Amino acid sequence: MEDMLFYDRLQFAFTITFHYIFPQLTMGLSLLIVFLKGKYLLSKIEKYNNAAKFLMKIFAVNFTMGVVTGIPMEFQFGTNWAKFSELTGSIIGQTLAMEGMFSFFLESSFLALFIFGEKLMGQKLHFLTGFLVFLGSWASGWFILATNAWMQHPVGYEILENGKFVLNNFGDLFTNPWLLPAFLHNQIASVVTSSFVVASIGAFYVLRNKQVEYGKLFLKTGVIFGLVSSILVAFPTGDWNAKNVAEHQPAAFAAMEGIFETEEAGSEIVLIGQPNMVDKKLDNKIAVPNILSFLTHQDWNKQIPGMDQFKEEELPSNIPALYYSYHIMVGLGTIFIGVMALALFFLWRKKLYTIKPLLWTIMFLVPFPYIANLTGWYTAELGRQPYLVYGLLKTSDGISPTVSSGNTLFTLLGFVALYMLLGLLFLVLVGKTINQGPTPQTH
Amino acid sequence: MTGTLISLISILIGIIAANTFGYFNKKYSFGLTGNSLIGVFGSVLLIKSFGRLGFDPWSIMQNGTFHIGLFLINCIVSILGGILGLFITKHIENKINKKAAN
């Protein structure tokens, strides 16, 4: 049973990590596309239109990869997590079905119209199709986050005698206090990723002295959106989320902040330290006193319960992984603000395009927003453990009892092989698109 | 679980079929990127629409036994999906261009 749980979780972790590489770019990129297309409508300068159409090509490749890697996610609910689906299906099935029916179809239909229909529709309608793609991709995030928010903080449900969860208030699914802060934080984090991707494409063009006009446009757009989103992802949305965790999942909050012992007065904030699970303390820590209490409760001396206040079974099952995920996310977020602020300063001084070390830095920073987004999700998911539905349904009670660990391991190896092929195809397609550049081809 | 893997294999076959057909029939080709995207959606559409006639991934793996015959039908439908996707997209593109020209 232990083995089955481990392999089921490993497979889900692998497939969802690979899957989330793609939607996090499409959601943020759609906003940048709408911005560039809108700028073209206002200014009638052709380069904005070409830039929007170029980014939509990258969007299309990403979107398709998201669809392909999303299919196993859908299947896994039935195959690996049959008990969870059986017990909670009448609730999570609502939001997941809405994601497919409303957002996916909205996104895919108007994506095709955006790509093929410019000449037919004219510029205003073309802008509208771009906006509807943006709406579809963000609505998709909304419905997925509504599902996750219910698992993190279940509302509007009742449990029948047979153990099944049913909805008693549909509206509660969308007014869940967990949902809005999580949605805003997630969406703005996806804007951070896409800003870095766009800025890095710009840096690549400028450094190679190729498509320089577009390179400068991408750098400027990426840096401005990158700085604004990097700040917004920390405050207010990240702050709001952390307060939510402190209120609704205090054990997870203590674990992610590394508070082993409750302090008498205010809690310190840990900048660096390694969780020592044997002695129940942080080794080699660097911390600033009372800051955590102030950030969480706006009171320097407010007590925050440490892990010693909770029973062993209430604590997250992998505290070091949770602690490191959270700190990697926060650390990277801080670096993003620093780099983008520096880049914006040099953009303002009209020197950004000539400072090669900064351009190289921007170009090579591109994997890190992905890592920050993924570790953010690990924080949310590891913090919820050992529950699937917080406080109500244990993860070990949600797996399929008849699927053997050998079966799951075999398919996991298959996924790894197929995803490597898909990953290679993705890199080739995106590389080809970037190499071609936004300048329209003449036939 | 193996059913999920089969669905991914079908998609890859769709991508390969669309690219191969596009390579030999330039008239219907949309380039590597276009063909690959069409291959994905073409194969998914056909397998999702007609798979329940008895050759979807679940039927192939029914009772834990792998049915090679059904798997081959699944692969052929994926190939058809990729190719049909190219035809349909080209048809739509031509119609749109004609309307835009008028």
Image (cartoon, coloured by chain):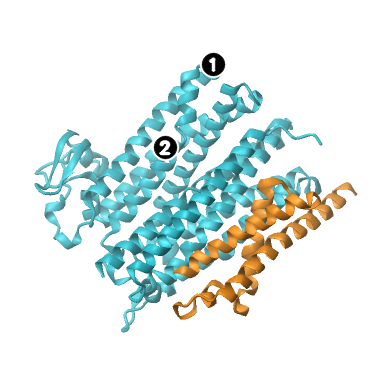
Chain colours: A cyan, B orange
Q: Is residue B2 above or below residue A213?
A: below
As drawn, is A358 to the left or to the right of A326?
Answer: right
Residue A414 position within the rendered picture, expressed as x and y whole percent measured from the top left: 45, 60
Q: Check disc 2 and give the amino acid type.
A: Phe
- Whichever of labels 1 and 2 marks the residue nearer the N terminus, that label is 1
Q: Check disc 1 and give the amino acid type.
A: Thr
Assign a secondary structure to mark 1.
helix
Residue A169 position within the rendered picture, expressed as x and y whole percent measured from the top left: 42, 72
- Residue at the disc numbered 1: A354
As drawn, is A60 to the left or to the right of A121?
Answer: left
Q: Is residue A203 above or below residue A103?
A: above
Residue depicted at 18% across the width and 34% down the height = A287
Residue depicted at 39% across the width and 60% down the height = A12
Query: Which quadrant is the C terminus of chain A positioned in?
Result: top right
Q: Which chain letter matches label 1?
A: A
As drawn, is B98 to the left or to the right of A226?
Answer: right
- Residue at the disc numbered 2: A368
Residue B28 visible in rendering: yes
